[in-house]
Amino acid sequence: MSWLLNLYKTYQENLDRIGKIEERFYGDKSKTFTLLPISHTTQTAHIEVLVTKDGSFHSAKVTDKEDAVTVIPCTEASSSRAGSVVAPYPLHDKLMYVAGDYEAYGGQRKEHFQRYIENLELWANSSHAHPKLSRILAYLKQKTLIRNLVDEGILHVDENQHLIEKWDKKYGENKPDIFSVLAGDQFSAFVRFDVHSYPEVSRKVWNDGEMYDSFVQFYNTLLNDEDICFVKGEVIPQTERHANKIRHSGDKAKLISSNDTSGFTFRGRFDKSQQVASVGYEVSQKAHNALKWLIQYQGRSIDQRVFLVWQYDQLQTPSPFDDPYSFEDFPEKKESFTAREYAQEISKALAGYEHDLRLKKRDIHILILDAATTGRLAVLYYINMDKHLYLNRLNHWYVSCCWRQRYAEGKTSIGTPTPKDIAFAMYGPQVKEQLIKEVASRLVPYIVGNQMNQNIPKDIVNLAFQRASNPVAMKSWEWEKTLGIACALVNIKEGMEVALDQSNTDRSYLFGRLLAIADVLERRALGSDEQRSTNAIRYMNAFSRHPERTWTTIYAALQPYRIKLGARGMYLEKLMDGILSSFAVDDYTNKPLSGKYILGFSSQRHELYQKRDQTKMNGTDEKGE
């Protein structure tokens, strides 16, 4: 229950943001959302109806898709209604509930309208009523809603004066707007109401804080089923019906559900759901609304699995999914960035979050949610930890898992791969989101856990390493990106410098350096016009498994390129001889290479390309003459 309590506390810390419309950008697109009041939910409205102050019809329009999501009051019954259950929303609802002339235009229903009007009258006549309620109620009692919408050209009827279920060209060439926003027929249209108050300026009913408070206070008077709340430890009104629409507006999955009242009832262990756990209505509402808001505000969703990191009083919290280059005031990507400079900038950026004096609470909360079925949502992982400890572990991850990365815009710089990048390295650019979310779910506990006493999952490192050792199966850009990610993963354990370490005599590192020199030598002989893979690249996979034998083949294949380069290749020849002389007698064998070989390969290759660029700038050859 700790995650529910912490979500409840988050809601309490952010009461000033209730009802405030916020926006989150996804590339070129954006999505608006708000922290919902309790006893409220969201629905996509298709039609907006304005009534006058004296309770008459004023006008109507089809809502824009960008403005269709509407905050509406709801009861426990209406928020979880399904199938043939008659449970009206208190104010805004479908035509079946709000239109008194529904049957006159071909609709079929039971007591939907009567139940709706009864509930609305109860609210409008209470001591907590808002003035706009009586005007909307007076209009709806006239039972002319569909007729007014037809006259206004919003809804459309056939020759029998019944609502058209599906538009056909026989009714006209131009398809009306209402059919563009509806997924079903016109009977399924959802209607929201407002009061025309010109020339006075007033907020829309669905954005009005006073209207929110009106219903919350009214509905609280109807709650009387009290029990001890397992979250707060207090005796308060409890609920068995908990919110859905947690991950998005179309989400039907619930975190808490107890509808197994027949058959294998509660697995035979309990008689009633309250015996398992009792959750207060207010706690459930606030916790679920806070969770919805946090997911919309900063959650990461991969194949419907949600990854969320938050604090009570600071929403923009660094996440294991963040690329450090996205941090505020973090330097831009650049080729000359060293690993030490990168580590310093990481520490500086995270220190800004650590020492923000405006923050009172120090706990960080990490939550992973996913649904096995359309109706059940599960907490796959939850942990709350001290902010200082969390930022230290995040810092350790960024610094230990870093190498020279190739980015989408073509830049190369020291960086840390994100979980999505790591899945790319493991499975290729066409990796499915189902695999990405599994990789991310396995990495998060390692990143936020004690990295000193546990290892990153071996299969993650091995898959990336194997793909990096097989460049002929990939395009050049894909392999370069995979190589950088694989090096970062391997280096978590090895802890080596990104810059070339000429004093390192590890056999795998030395073999990797040899392979890099062979690749550069042949590439220089081929020239920039020839794009085919070098022998070193073609034999890289075999080289990682049988280095001594494969090196003999690669070295022999270099002969024509060495002749072609002549004196220009002397520096590389000497470098190659120096590395070969560094091998211990027992190390120059066919034993498969460890991950260190790609570290030696990457560092040596980069060093040679950097040296080549520098000599061109200075107008000298590689011997400095």
Image (cartoon, rainbow, N blue to C red):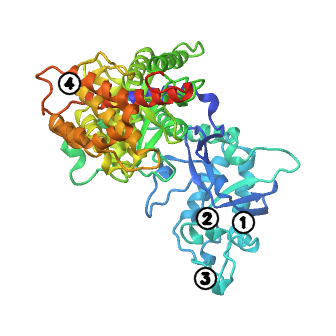
- Element type at mark 2: helix
Sequence-wise, the earlier of marks 3 and 4 is: 3
Q: Position of residue 371 (x, y in %)?
A: 35, 47
The CA span between labels 1 and 4 is 89 Å
Sequence-wise, the earlier of marks 2 and 4 is: 2
Q: Position of residue 209 (x, y in %)?
A: 68, 38
Q: Do the residues labelled 2 and 3 touch (CB within 8 Å)?
A: no
The CA span between labels 2 and 4 is 66 Å
Q: Nearer the viewer, mark 2 or mark 1?
A: 2
Q: What kind of residue is marked 4?
A: Arg
Residue position for label 2: 181
Residue sitting at x 78%, y 63%: 59
- Element type at mark 4: helix
Residue position for label 4: 507
Sequence-wise, the earlier of marks 3 and 1 is: 1
The CA span between labels 3 and 4 is 75 Å
- Element type at mark 3: loop
Residue position for label 3: 168
